[in-house]
């Protein structure tokens, strides 16, 4: 995002330490009047989210809902995720395959919850975040799951269930070989997650 140039007032908001409810009103009324309508708008909102270390409670809902509206409801195919949009989302919220920001991980799973169809690339990526947290204590989910245990927790299973629900909406009972392998690595069938070395 080195080439990203923010215009006023987005530039001023991105330069702040703390985002307030008033900043959200400014974004709604002066920056994203029609909501997000281009990928550049989404990149700007992501940049603001990443640049401000402190955020008001209202920011969480605004960010996730605004981004989801654009990714799922505005972009073609409307209501669903295709490979192109999945790849774009993955590239925006992860570094070397890992989502480190809790709010961006929540965005990922909210998109998965809301889309009528998700491609294999997105389901495997989401399951990989769970596997990394359990087996390597890496990524946002490692800090959110509430335990450093390597075994499966109820929270892990609940997150896997959200992905499985999206797969069911997308393809019925059919799991791809890649999805089966990832579920095996997490330990859904055995209760024992596999390490990266053993995968």
Image (cartoon, helix red, strand yellow):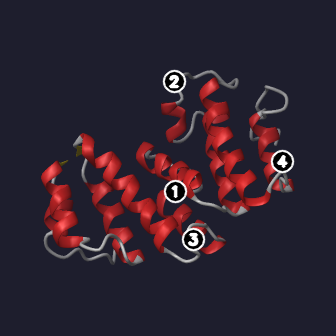
Figure quadrant of residue 193:
top right
Say which residue label 1 marks: 95
Q: Earlier in the sequence, mark 1 or mark 4?
A: 1
Q: Which label sits on residue 3?
A: none
Q: Residue at x 39, y 55 (%)?
A: 65
Q: Is residue 29 above or below residue 148?
A: below
Q: How many angstroms separate mark 1 from mark 2 (CA)?
A: 23 Å
Asked which secondary structure carries label 1, the reply is loop
Say which residue label 2 marks: 146
Say which residue label 4 marks: 180
Q: Residue at x 81, y 43 (%)?
A: 199
Asked which secondary structure carries label 2, the reply is loop
Say which residue label 3 marks: 85
Q: Earlier in the sequence, mark 1 or mark 2?
A: 1
Does the CB distance between marks 2 and 3 fall below 8 Å? no
Q: How many angstroms separate mark 4 from mark 3 (CA)?
A: 23 Å
Q: How many angstroms separate mark 1 from mark 4 (CA)?
A: 24 Å
Figure quadrant of residue 157:
top right
Give the number of the mark in front: 1 or 2.
2
């Amino acid at each position: 995002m080195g080439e990203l140039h923010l215009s006023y007032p987005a530039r001023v908001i991105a330069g702040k330490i703390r985002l307030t409810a008033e900043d959200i009103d400014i974004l709604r009324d002066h920056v994203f009047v029609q909501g997000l309508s281009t990928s550049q708008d989404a990149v700007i909102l992501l940049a603001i989210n990443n640049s401000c270390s402190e955020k008001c409670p209202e920011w969480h809902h605004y960010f996730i809902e605004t981004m989801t509206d654009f990714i799922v409801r505005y972009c073609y195919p409307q209501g669903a995720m295709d490979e192109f949009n999945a790849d774009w989302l993955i590239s925006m919220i992860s570094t070397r395959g890992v989502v480190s920001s809790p709010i961006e991980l929540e965005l990922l799973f909210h998109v998965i919850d809301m889309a009528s169809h998700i491609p294999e690339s997105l389901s495997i990526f989401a399951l990989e975040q769970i596997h990394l947290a359990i087996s390597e204590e890496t990524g946002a989910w490692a800090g959110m799951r509430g335990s450093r245990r390597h075994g499966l927790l109820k929270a892990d299973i609940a997150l896997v269930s959200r992905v499985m629900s999206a797969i069911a909406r997308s393809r019925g009972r059919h799991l791809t070989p890649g999805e089966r392998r990832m579920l095996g690595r997490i330990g859904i069938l055995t209760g024992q997650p596999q390490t990266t070395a053993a995968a």
